[in-house]
Amino acid sequence: MHLLPEEEQVLAGEYGETRQKMMEILAAIGTVFGAARLIPIKSAQVSGASYKTIGDAGLEWLTGLDARVSVPTVLNPIGMDRAAWREMGIPPGFAKKQEEIIAAYARLGIRLECTCTPYYIYQTRFGEHLAWSESSAVSYANSVIGARTNREGGPGALAAAIIGKTPEYGLHLVAARKPQVHIRVEGGDSWDDVARFGALGYLAGKIAGNRIPFFSGIRPRRDHLKALGAAMAASGAVALYHVAGITPEARIFSYAGSDIEQIPVTAGEVAALWNEIQVDAVALGCPHCSPEELSRVATLLSGKRVKIPVYIFAARKVIDSCHDAIAAIERSGARVYADTCMVVSPALERYRTIMVNSGKAFSYVPDMCGAAVRIGTTEECILVATDGAT
Ligand code: F3S
């Protein structure tokens, strides 16, 4: 990979050891993937922020770094709500380690917005180059916004954040964004809940693997797209997809829909993921809820009381902008938490069965929380949680 003279100086250690290490990471990634050069990025999003996932080894690595990020950079969800960790039942020892991780990231100049939905907080535009690492955020940025990012590992995203550049390969190149498999959905044109799209994504991710799918037969709105992409990134390794007539690049590539492998997925196959097992808790907000999703949950909970624990997750700035919805939700006994999520927090490990409205959570909860999982629409989740009570 060709480096500019000033990039060579960074690599030679003339701007400090940390920047040198970060340039080494970028140069190694660029060389492995055959990048011609580094390109500037607009923002970064760094995963590897929960003590549950990075442990003491990750904390030690972070505390040894000494540099500042060069572009706006946010964090992925951490292991607890920073303001309400006691209420979540997080052990003090875990909270202490988590705060040390947060402090290490803050010293690097990273904004302590801990969310997988940074696009609700910072405007991200079509065509911008990014270095994001959380898989659902990567999918949303590429597919729904039309920005360009590879699915970075935590160190790769951090290196890009500090240097302000990333190697130009993969999804940064238009030629690599063409669809590779056509998923023809039968009976999905009237779906209107994130869970149906999440369940479709769960199946489609297994079909697509790491290919770029092109969907027809569905009419998803933005929250539905978020659910679809998040699930495909979990059950497969999909970092970009197109939906006919909906996503910004579908028109550019629509010609390819007819000459690539076509695979049908039926509404019946999606419905077969539903079961009726008894649940101990309900968790919503994977990926983190949008204001519209919080408002819908508030409406569904209005005048009701929950009979089992209900956890709802969203970015703190989104929560702060939705006072009325949050008040209505919490009057029911459900709780809304910021900074964290059902998968990266240890808080939900105490339940045997968790009900979710997310295809990604459906994929991850069994391994990450050690619980059985049930998927349902948002309305079904609230019905189960309130048991029809008013
Ligand atoms: Fe976000 Fe956690 Fe789900 S990071 S996509 S809420 S697993």
Image: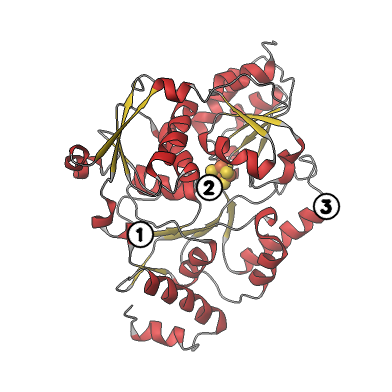
Q: Position of residue 243 (x, y in %)?
A: 30, 36
Q: In this rendering, does residue 293 appear at all? A: yes
Q: Position of residue 17 (x, y in %)?
A: 56, 83
Q: Residue at x 65, y 45 (%)?
A: 368
Q: Which residue is mark 3?
A: 92
Is residue 354 toward the left or the right of residue 235 in the image?
right
**How many numbered discs, if any?**
3
Is residue 202 toward the left or the right of residue 17 in the image?
left
Amino acid carrying label 1: it is His
SS assignment at label 2: loop
Tell me the distance, in whole angstroms, between the alpha carbons under discs 2 and 1.
18 Å
Tell me the distance, in whole angstroms, between the alpha carbons under discs 3 and 1.
39 Å
Task: Check whether the beta carbons of the residues at disc 2 and disc 1 lie within 8 A of each other.
Answer: no
**The image quadrant in which ligand 1 is located:** top right
Q: Position of residue 215 (x, y in %)?
A: 31, 35
Label 2 or label 3, whichever comes before in sequence order:
3
Amino acid carrying label 2: it is Cys
Q: Which mark is residue 129?
A: 1
